Image (cartoon, rainbow, N blue to C red):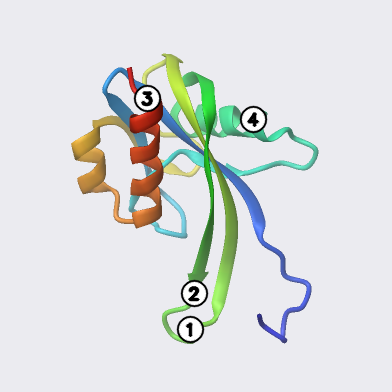
């Protein structure tokens, strides 16, 4: 724990593993952290916003897709450090939901550079972060058609 910034706190966020038949919706990140990497649609929870509403809002903002949440998958920490100093620069608490696509075609919006559906195998190859691959696998194992 850093003694130079005692008021720093983790940021609560949501992520959505949106399944459409045998495919999962991913976005290419247009902002840090993990700029340029394929990831789940999601983002910060707004003040006084219920977490499930935040998940559906972020999904819509980043991809233009509508979905129905089907269950809570996991809660994971995203702790990012500076390559130069090794100090923690960001800490997100990510609440990940599974969802079933109900409409819309993926179009990148908000801070996403791209958005599209991937097969499970394509997603596992495209996503670089182990925690994201783990959550995607959980969604397929528990909620895929």
- Asked where in the image residue 101 lies, by quadrant, the reply is top left
Q: CA distance from mark 4 to mark 3?
A: 16 Å
Tag shown at residue 86 = 1
| Sequence-earlier tag: 2 or 3 | 3
The picture places residue 132, in percent across and down from the top left corner, at 39, 48
| Sequence-earlier tag: 3 or 1 | 3
Label 3 environment density (alpha carbons within 10 Å; few <14, some 14–19, many ≥20)? many
| Sequence-earlier tag: 4 or 2 | 4
Report which residue position mark 2 lands on.
81
User: Vertical placement of 56 versus 14: above or below?
Assistant: above
Tell me if label 1 and label 2 are in contact, CB under 8 Å. yes
| Sequence-earlier tag: 1 or 2 | 2
Report which residue position mark 4 lands on.
52
Task: Using residue 143 as the reference point, say whether residue 91 is left or right of it.
Answer: right
Report which residue position mark 3 lands on.
19
The picture places residue 21, in percent across and down from the top left corner, at 30, 17
């Amino acid at each position: 724990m850093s003694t130079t910034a005692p008021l720093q706190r983790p940021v609560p966020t949501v992520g959505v593993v949106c399944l459409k038949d045998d495919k999962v919706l991913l976005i290419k990140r247009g902002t840090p952290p993990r700029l340029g990497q394929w990831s789940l649609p999601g983002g910060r929870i707004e003040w006084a916003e219920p977490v499930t509403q935040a998940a559906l809002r972020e999904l819509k903002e980043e991809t233009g897709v509508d979905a129905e949440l089907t269950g809570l998958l996991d809660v994971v920490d995203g702790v990012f450090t500076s390559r130069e100093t090794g100090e923690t620069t960001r800490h997100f608490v990510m609440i990940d939901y599974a969802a079933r696509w109900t409409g819309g075609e993926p179009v990148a919006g908000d801070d996403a550079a791209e958005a599209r559906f991937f097969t499970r195998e394509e997603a596992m190859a495209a996503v670089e972060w182990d925690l994201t691959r783990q959550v995607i696998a959980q969604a397929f194992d528990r909620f895929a058609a």
